[in-house]
Every structure is written in structure tokens, then in C-alpha cells.
Amino acid sequence: MVRKKVKRALEAARGRDLDCDESLENFLDELPFAVTGAFGGNTTCFEIQDACDDPDEYILFDAGTGIRDFGNAYMASGKAGKKSTFHIFMSHVHWDHIQGFPFFVPAYIPGNKIIFHGHHQSIESSFRQQMENPCFPVPMGVMNATFEFDIRPPGSSFDIAGFHITTIEQKHPGITYGYRCEKDGKIVVISTDSEHKDDFDDDNYPFLDFYRDADVVVFDAQYTFADAGLAKEDWGHSSNLVAVELCSRARVKTLCMVHHEPTASDDALEAIQSDSRRYAELFNDFCADCYPRHIYVAHDAMCLEL
């Protein structure tokens, strides 16, 4: 993959005057992301934070392999000597959403507190069982952080670190939960591993209100529209076209698509991004105030500022 990217960059450089650093930087800025970068392959983990705060509390969603990178960044930030609290909200406990936790370094540091929040009664047992023989050599009991499990009935809301967080039940094998997070007039919705069936077209479809006027919706768009409705129906994921339609109708400002198909190349993911932007224009009939205003396919370590 790297060789292919280098070859495409060299082909694009033919005939260009690249004798100085400035011209090199300008040339690189012209290349597509699929050439100069990579979307990555981490499984689900998202963070939200108030940029005005120097946090002792961190809010994460799911503990896929991305939580390892978050933990390493935390350790490198110089905050590892402080006692920190990590709130981890769980959409569900399928393995791709918990498998990064054994490699989450802050969990091994005394004085840190880790609080799991969610609605599945199996959250604690799932995290502990994946670190037992024969699956893993280090049991969860070796971790020196303090653990709490805040499991509430479906429909309950949470008030954590100044954020008001409400939930919605989602269609996915085993049931998942989406989270709507509100603070100081800003709204972020985390809605991964959710399948939207034919009823998503209804005027009273509950996700319309759940997404309504959000600044960002993080949306599961793993499949093509054809796969989501035919070959992979009931597998628990949605498509980029459904993402655009729902977010347009709910007046969402920014759509960020996640949970990518593992077999998709960087070129394919970049094509999904451009196709989705074009579809949003068509769906909104070229209106002057189209929604969503920004559409992204997420990549590892991506940061959106509101």
C-alpha cells in the first residue's frame, strides 16, 4: 500500500519544480488524502472534551483498539503523574469495542479511576473474561486503577463532567446504544453500530429527534447502500446514503462516518467521502443552506473542533 502511494506521488511530481521546501509543501497539499495519509484500521474509540478545560476527567466512547492510542497519547502528554478519571461509555460489548482495553496503559497506574457507563448488564463480565485464560496472559486484576461499573436501566440519562448525556436503543445484534452529549449549547451524537431499516423514511422516526440540530453526528456507515439492504441486511450497520439523508433531515451540521468496511482501501474510503458530499448536494436540491454542511470519513486520530 505504501509503495503504491509513493508511486502515485512520484507520478504526480513529474515536470514539477520542487527545488525548495515551500514548493514541496504546496505540492503535497494538492495530493489527495489517500496518497499522503491513511485512514487507519483501529476499532471503535472516541473522545469528547471541553477544549477550555485542562481535564482530570476524560470521556470516551467504547474501548476498541483506538483506546490504546489514546492511552499512549495521555502518557506522552505529561499528565501520567496526575490522578485521572476515565469515563468509558459503552455502545455494546462486541469484541471490536472492548479488545483495546488490555493495552490501555492508564488502567495499570495506581490512583487512576475508570468508570464504565452503559445499559448492558454484561459489561463487567465481558471486560474481565477477555483477559482470562486462554484468551490473554494478564488478568484484569493486575490493573492497579480503581474500577466502577455504572450500569443503568435503558432510557436513563447521565450527567458527567458538565455534559448531559442521553441515550437511544439501536438496531444491532444484541442491541446497542447511541449517545447524545450536550454542553454549553454544543451537541455531539455518537451513533455507531446501528442499522436503519426501511422505516428510517418515516416522519416520526425517533433518530430524527435524537440527531436534531447536532453539531456533529458520528454515524456508522460501514456498508454500501446495496449491501446494507440486501446481502448484509440485519448485520447491524448502515450506509453513507442513509447517513446523509438522516442527517440532512435532522439539520445536522457535520456528519462524520465511522466503522469502515475492513476490506476497503484508502482510495475507496476517499471515494465514499466525495460521493457522500455530492449526494448531499443532490438530496438537498442545491439549496443555499444545505445540511450537513461538512461531511467526513473519519481516520485514526482525527480531531473535530466545534
Image: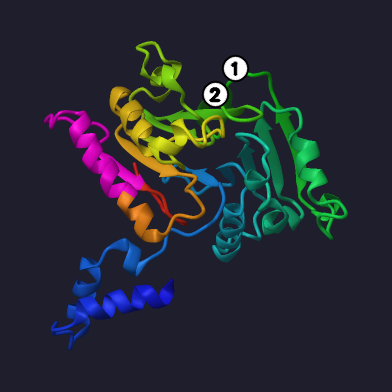
**Secondary structure beneath disc 2?**
strand
Q: Are marks 1 and 2 in contact (CB under 8 Å)?
A: yes
Circle 1: is it few (<14), some (14-19), or many (20+) Cα within 10 Å?
few
Residue 248 occupies quadrant:
top left
* Rendered location of residue 156, percent (x, y): 61, 18
> On the picture, is 169 further left or further right than 227?
right
**Label 1 sits on residue:** 155
Q: Residue at x 27, y 81 (%)?
A: 10
Q: Position of residue 103 (x, y in %)?
A: 69, 58
Going by the numbered disc 2, the residue's amino acid type is Thr
Where residue 74 sits in the image (x, y, percent)? Answer: 58, 58
Amino acid type, callout 1 = Gly
Q: Between 25 and 203, which is closer to the camera in this rendering?
A: 203
Asked if residue 43 lies left or right of residue 305, the reply is right
Q: Is residue 217 visible?
A: no
* For residue 134, above or below residue 10: above
Instruction: Give the mark nearer the N terminus: 1 vs 2.
Output: 1
Magenta segment: 272-296
